[in-house]
Image (tube, helix red, strand yellow):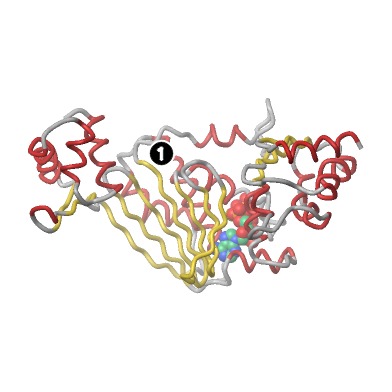
Amino acid sequence: MTPYLRRAILATIAEDGSNVAARLAGQHGVSRQSASVWLGKLKQEGVVASSGVGRGVRYRLATLAQVRQVYPRAELHEDRVWSEAIAPALRDLPANVRDIWRYAVTEMVNNAIDHSGSEQVTVELQRDALNTTVYVADEGEGIFLKIQRALNLYDPREAILELAKGKLTTDPARHTGEGIFFSSKVMDAFDIHSGKLHFMHDEWGADVLLERPADASGTLVLMRLANDGGRTLQEVFDQFAAPEEYTFAKTIVPVRLAQHEGEKLVSRSQAKRLTMRFERFQTVVLDFDGVEEIGQAFADEVFRVFQQAHPATALLPIHMTPAVENMFKRAMRA
Ligand SMILES: Nc1ncnc2c1ncn2[C@@H]1O[C@H](COP(=O)(O)OP(=O)(O)OP(=O)(O)O)[C@@H](O)[C@H]1O
Ligand SMILES: [Mg+2]
């Protein structure tokens, strides 16, 4: 079995554990019997487990490492959590993957220590043959409510737009507001759940706001990364740095996040909400993906009023529909 075939089989199982032999046979042009031999080998190796028999057999990726630690928050240090609980389970991974994990785990644990006010911090890890998933949970105030309160936002959902922009901190004396921005982008999947709200960075690179019925008290962060991922921490930092500089100078803002359930972006107050803190960046890429149209006052406020007040910040709109582009051009001509 080549490494390529092995990974493909494991990915098929991770996607769906039922009818695996038949699906593999179809995908690879082999008989079900040959596919069953592959599955038998992976079971013997211990990376795949199964339950049930005959046609009802279900496969899943075996858990190869599992950690759960609950710490009192007082006097906890993120480096200690990393080296005691997480690093030992990841020792054999490639250096680029370990570096990413060290960064993201210490950032998220530091957040729970410095911002949550929780009594305890829980850290969990699960590793299988393809991915590692780490959870960092606290029972504090909850991230979105904390940001809403500190920034005096009308709706906790606006906290997600602020997190997506980056450089958001409620403690500027001791923090810079980079931890979540970069941790979310180095992971394959990143999800902060608090109350009914989720801030997710999905595997296609988009920042998403989700509302789900399940309530999380405090703040729960889930991070997932492939064990053989090719990304490096440095290349992600570089994407958001100005050329020849190493500082966080550029951001990409999903404009869609300023638009709550079907509302249209028409008013100056919506535009002010969107452009809040843009002046902290040299470049703001405005990603209009998912935005069908914008109103004249909104466009004027962003592209003329804000721009004139803050000429040092370059605004670069992308993924505009023809309707959005018309409003953009009109504001530029004014
Ligand atoms: N576990 C948490 N509980 C409550 N609020 C949180 C939690 N984690 C983060 N926050 C809030 O989210 C903000 C952004 O977090 P982020 O890690 O991006 O930046 P920071 O911690 O302020 O700065 P840096 O990470 O650069 O030190 C924090 O300032 C804080 O208000
Ligand atoms: Mg932080």
Horizontal and vertical percent position of residue 203: 46, 43
Horizontal and vertical percent position of residue 285: 69, 38
Query: Residue under circle 1?
Result: 97
197 left or right, relative to 284:
left
Asked if 25 appears above or below 209 in the picture, the reply is above
Horizontal and vertical percent position of residue 41: 11, 40
Q: Is residue 115 visible?
A: no
Seen as rendered, the residue at the extreme right is 334
Q: Look at 53% across and 66% down and name the residue there.
A: 194
Q: Is residue 160 visible?
A: yes
Name the residue type under label 1. Answer: Val
Quarter occupied by residue 303: top right
Q: Look at 40% across and 41% down and name the residue there.
A: 98
Horizontal and vertical percent position of residue 24: 20, 38
Which of 130/172 is in front?
130
Local packing at callout 1 (Cα closer than 10 Å; few below 14, some 14-19, many 20+) is many
Which of 35/186 is in front?
35
Q: Look at 14% across and 31% down and name the residue there.
A: 30
7 left or right, relative to 113:
left
Seen as rendered, the residue at the extreme front is 323
Asked if 89 appears above or below 76 in the picture, the reply is above
- Quadrant where the C terminus sits is top right
204 left or right, relative to 115:
left
